[in-house]
Image: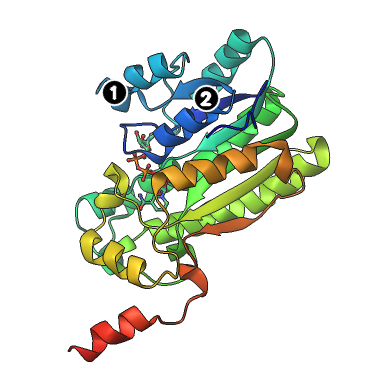
């Protein structure tokens, strides 16, 4: 069901890789709610081609940008302004990557070259995007920026590895930049802390199956799906949440505030 919540709004969606991606679902939901979109991803991800399918479906141009390159981000915002003939009203940052995770290097043994690269892509990229947007005055007043994060920023999940540090910084950037952008232009910046979700990035974490099943049992409402996350993003891009900024918002079926559930106790009693 659509409510026209984003009618007349324009946005940039980072990170749609394939149809499992949270960004992919969010693009579809934003389009259904009346938004006009620009899609972007790293040139290497775009070579896989799937994003063009989405582009056709949501009637959006695709502008490549590697988020570690200032030049690419500058070009993305300049081309987006040309395309819309105006600034944008919302941005989804749905980007994450850790080479330590990919290569199975455990946290205490992290390779710092890998750490730097992952940090640049997963955390600093939000600062870069906001810095370029601000310089080019590319976000309209009352605009909304959302980045995706995970509760490993606050609690230990050993196999989440250096992504835990990246997410902690990402949330901090959202808070701090949210202050400056809020004061200057009433632009709001928030992070959504999503349940584990079966996507390319998600499934890369070691022991993901056990992890997602545990979260399901530990959440009174069960795990939030990618589609439900897309719904939540729509509300944050809409005018109904104008006074929400600098927040880390848990979208996890209650996991973050649950000590234990009956389902988990029953499982433990079997051992
Ligand atoms: N899947 C989960 O369990 C889960 C849970 C909480 C938060 N998140 C977060 O959600 C976001 C989206 O991930 P997803 O689960 O949809 O997986 P995904 O693999 O579909 O998306 C990750 C995206 O990051 C992009 N990316 C990587 N390097 C890039 C670069 N240099 N420049 C530009 N883009 C780059 C990839 O191309 C891909 O589109 C990430 O921030 C992730 O950490 C995921």
- Label 1: few (<14), some (14–19) or many (≥20) C-alpha neighbours in 10 Å: some
What residue is at 53 percent from the left and 17 percent from the top? Answer: 75
Give me the disc on residue 130: none
Q: Secondary structure at mark 1?
A: helix
Q: Secondary structure at mark 2?
A: helix
What residue is at 47 percent from the left and 35 percent from the top? Answer: 26
Residue 252 image position (x, y, % from top left):
47, 60
Depicted 144 relative to depicted 250: above or below: above
The residue mark sitting in front, 2 or 1, is: 2
Instruction: Decide which of 177, 46 is in the foreground and name it.
Output: 46
- Reading the image, the residue beneath label 2 is 31
**52 lies left or right of 33:** left
N-term-proximal mark, 2 vs 1: 2
**183 lies left or right of 98:** right
Depicted 70 relative to depicted 154: above or below: above
- Reading the image, the residue beneath label 1 is 50
What residue is at 49 percent from the left and 47 percent from the top? Answer: 148
Residue situated furthest front in the rendering: 1
Residue 241 image position (x, y, % from top left):
71, 45
**119 lies left or right of 35:** left
């Amino acid at each position: 069901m659509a409510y026209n919540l984003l009618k007349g709004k324009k946005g940039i969606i980072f990170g749609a890789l394939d149809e499992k991606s949270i960004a992919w679902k969010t693009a579809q939901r934003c389009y259904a709610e009346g938004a006009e979109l620009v899609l972007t991803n790293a040139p290497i991800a775009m070579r896989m081609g799937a994003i063009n399918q989405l582009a056709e479906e949501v009637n959006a141009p695709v502008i490549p940008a590697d988020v570690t390159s200032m030049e690419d981000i500058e070009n993305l915002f300049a081309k987006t302004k040309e395309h819309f003939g105006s600034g944008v009203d919302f941005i989804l940052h749905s980007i994450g990557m850790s080479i330590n995770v990919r290569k199975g290097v455990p946290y205490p043994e992290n390779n710092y070259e890998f750490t730097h690269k992952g940090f640049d892509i997963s955390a600093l990229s939000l600062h870069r995007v906001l810095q370029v947007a601000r310089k080019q005055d590319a976000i309209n007043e009352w605009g909304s920026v959302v980045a995706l994060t995970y509760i490993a920023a606050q609690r230990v999940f050993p196999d989440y590895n250096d992504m835990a540090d990246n997410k902690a910084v990402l949330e901090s950037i959202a808070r701090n930049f949210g202050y400056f952008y809020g004061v200057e232009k009433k632009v709001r910046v928030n992070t959504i802390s999503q349940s584990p979700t079966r996507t390319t990035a998600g499934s890369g974490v070691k022991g993901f199956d056990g992890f997602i099943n545990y979260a399901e049992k530990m959440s009174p409402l069960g795990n939030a799906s990618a589609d439900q996350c897309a719904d939540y993003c729509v509300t944050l891009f809409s005018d109904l949440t104008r006074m929400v900024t600098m927040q880390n918002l848990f979208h996890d079926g209650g996991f973050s505030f649950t000590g234990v559930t009956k389902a988990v106790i029953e499982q433990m009693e079997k051992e």
